[in-house]
Amino acid sequence: MFEITKTDLDGRIGKIDCDNGSIETPTLLPVIHPVNQIVNIKTINEIGFSAVMTNAYITLKNYGEEAIEKGIHKIINFEGPIMTDSGGYQVLEYGKVDAEPIQMAKFQESIKTNFANVLDHPTSLKDSVTNAKQGVNETLSACEQTLENISRKSIWIGPVQGGKYLDLVEFSAKKIAKMNFDMYALGSPTEIMESYNYKLLAKMIITAKKYLPVEKPLHLFGLGHPLPLSLAVALGCDTFDSASYILYAKDGRYFTDMGTKKIDELDYLPCVCKICVEHTVKEIKSLAKIEKTRTIAIHNLYMLWKEIQSTKLAIKEGRLWEYIGNRTRIHPKLWDSFIHLSENEFLFENKNPRFKKKGIFFSTFPDNRRPEVLMVNNKIKNFLMQNKNKIIIILPLTQRRYSLYNNRLLKKLNEINIEALIGYIIPPFGFIPYQLTDIYPISQMEISENMHNESNTIKQTIEFIDQQFKIIKPKHIYLVTDESSETEITKFIINRYSPKKILKNTEEITKEIFDI
């Protein structure tokens, strides 16, 4: 059902097949109101959205038997894949609905929905731990009832609840993972995003992903703003749904690359979508209420589609880290979530590609925490385990060139049968033997001057050097310096390891150290 074709961090480009076509992930499913849809669904499809979400509970209450006779695709006039919400959003908003889990499960299959959701009990941000526990248990009970009473005509999605209580998210994910669902979903981040608590959202996703099968897609309920979308993808979410495009538009809020703006406060339209090319900001402001809402909503959909496409491109090019780094700088709370992601880089170690077609960039903190750094550090340690108790010769870099440039030195060492590890200090990796300087990403990276002098990078480099030298247990250390070597890292090596010789060039090694 789910075929993954490309990965970066925990983001995945993949394909989910269903009876009405396929969905390429990551993607967002705009929410369609089954009774009062303001934006024509044909317009949504023309923008690029190949799948949508609608509400089965509202459909049941407004269409009843007619929906069963016609099917949900005819009810909302859409031929592509459709996901239905079973009323969980209404439970979150109003506390309860006039329906039962088995009833909603059978109804969803009878209207031929492609992706069906259990009538769960979403965890509100306002819930006490007692109420949250009760809601999680009610959701798990609803899941069991649903699975016992369905015919598997749809792709069934198992909901993980628990909200801000991460222990409940863990408990819920472990239980749901043991049930025979086709997909999983995490709810409900709507209130969390409204409070800009993106760090909590990141923690929830990380917690749930630890315990869910990696081969199955993960849906994130209610995330519909462009800014946090790429972050959620990087953490492992594959599909999203939201009515934000219309809800924001009703309030006159207009999506931009830099956040959401009130249309009445804008003097310019910073966009080249069809809406913004064909209208001036003055014209949009002067539209009647319903038409103004529709116009802004269509623009918002274009911005959401752009974000989906940009995120896919970042995955394809192996630049998802750079992309979310840029996106999260838009808001301090988003930046906090990126820092939290960087503190969990071990989560991506075995999921990140071992090699990328394009080089990577180290611009500023927290780029020193990229998962590639952890990958290289492990390779260095494995290499050093095979080269213990040797002499270490640390050479300066020549114009940031990492390959061994003094073949005469290597030749002389071989002639006199001296085993030495020759290498460089390369932030943020630490000591790198010349034999490893051609591996990815060391041979394909750019490091800013800021990174070389940044305190977190220096601290990490020193920690790595300490770990590496403890593995080697070197007989002696010879440090060759130049003007670029006058750094805190060099001072650390001198003070901590007391090199036998500190030299100004490699010629001194052969003349003074080995007396050649």
Image (cartoon, rainbow, N blue to C red):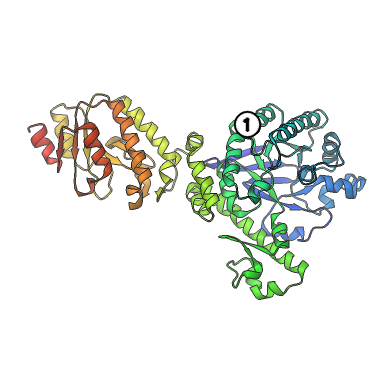
- From the viewer's perspective, is 141 left or right of 339? right
- From the viewer's perspective, is 26 left or right of 441? right
Q: Quadrant of the C terminus?
A: top left
The picture quadrant where one finds residue 282 is bottom right
Residue flagged by tag 1: what amino acid is it?
Asp
Residue 163 in the image: above or below residue 469: below
- From the viewer's perspective, is 410 left or right of 453? left
Q: Nearer the viewer, residue 381 or 125?
A: 125
Q: Which element type, helix, strand or loop, lies under badge 1?
A: helix
Q: Nearer the viewer, residue 37 or 129?
A: 129
Residue found 20% across the figure and 49% down from its top: 483
Q: Nearer the viewer, residue 410 or 287?
A: 287
Residue 382, position in %: x, y? 36, 28
**Can residue 316 be seen by looking at this rendering?**
no
Residue found 75% across the figure and 59% down from its top: 42
Residue 362, position in %: x, y? 39, 48
- From the viewer's perspective, is 266 left or right of 428? right
Q: Quadrant of the N terminus?
A: top right
Residue 103, position in %: x, y? 86, 36
Residue 336, position in %: x, y? 52, 47
Residue 409 in the image: above or below residue 190: above
**Can residue 118 be seen by looking at this rendering?**
yes
Residue found 59% across the figure and 45% down from its top: 232
Which residue in the protein does label 1 denote? 167
Q: Residues within 10 Å of mark 1 (few under 14, many from 20)?
A: some
Total count of labels: 1
Residue found 45% across the figure and 44% down from its top: 356
